[in-house]
Image (cartoon, rainbow, N blue to C red):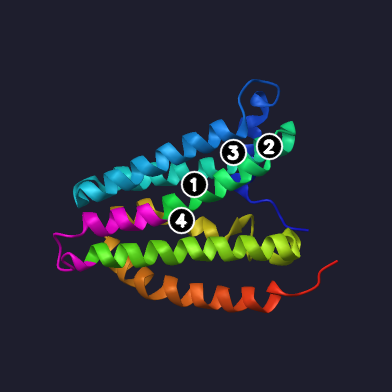
Amino acid sequence: MAVKTWDAKIANWLVQPLKNTWVTPNHLTTVRLITGLAAAFILGIEPKLANIGAFVFALSNFLDHTDGELARISGKSSKLGHVYDLASDAIIHILIFLGIGIGLRNTQLGYGAILMGLVSGIAVAFIFHWRNQMEKKLGKDLTSQPNFCGFDIEDILYLLPIVTILNGLIPLLIAATIGAPVFAIWVFWEYQKVKYLDIK
C-alpha cells in the first residue's frame, strides 16, 4: 500500500472543515490553477521577482493535494474533476518552466532560454500524463513513486524557492532541458511495456 506523504496528510487535515460545506474539489483545483498561473507569470517578469514566484509555486504545488483529499473524504469525486485536475497539472508545469525561461531571456542564455523552458515544461507534462496512464492501468500501489520518510520524488518541486534564493535558475533550466526529456523517454518506454497488459 502506498504511503501517504506529509503534504497529503497536512492537506487532508486542512480540508476536514470543508467536508460538509458547499466547497467542492473543483473549487480547490481552481485555486491551485490560479496560484500556479500567477507563479508562472511572476517568474516570467524578471529574475528579481523569482523568489516570490517560487514561493507562490510551492503553495500551488501544495494546493494540488487539497482537491484530491477533499474528494476522498467528502465523496465528491468526479470524472470531470479528475480530468480538470490533470489538465491543471499539465498547464502549470508547462507554464512554470516557460515562465522561468522567459524570466531568464536577458541572461547569458538569451532567448534560447524560452525554448529551453518550453521543452522542459512539455517533457514534465508528458511524464505526468504517462505516469497517470500507468496508474490507471496498474493501480496506485504498483505505480507509486519512491517514498522516503513521507517524502516522494515529486516533493523536490518544493525546493524551487531555495533554488531561486541561491540564484540557481540557470543551472536548473539547463538540467531540466536535458534531464526532463530523457526521463520522459524512459517513462514512455515503461508505459509502452504495460500499455497492452491484460490486468485483472
Instruction: Name which of mark 3 and mark 4 comes first in the sequence.
Output: 3
Q: Element at badge 3?
A: helix
Image x and y of residue 97, in percent: 35, 58
How far is disc 3 from disc 4 in space, using C-alphas? Answer: 16 Å
Q: Are marks 2 and 4 in contact (CB under 8 Å)?
A: no
Q: Look at mark 1 in the image and give the residue it sits on.
A: 88
Pick the quarter of the image with the N terminus. Answer: bottom right
Return the residue at label 3.
66
Disc 3 vs disc 4: which is toward the camera? 3
Q: Residues within 10 Å of mark 3 (few under 14, many from 20)?
A: many
Q: Nearer the viewer, mark 2 or mark 4?
A: 2
Along the line of sight, the residue nearer the viewer: 162 or 126: 126
Task: Give the label, 1 or 2, closer to the camera.
Answer: 1
Residue 14, quarter of picture: top right
Which residue is label 2 attached to?
71
In depth, the one of 62 and 125 nearer the eye is 125
Q: Are marks 1 and 3 in contact (CB under 8 Å)?
A: no
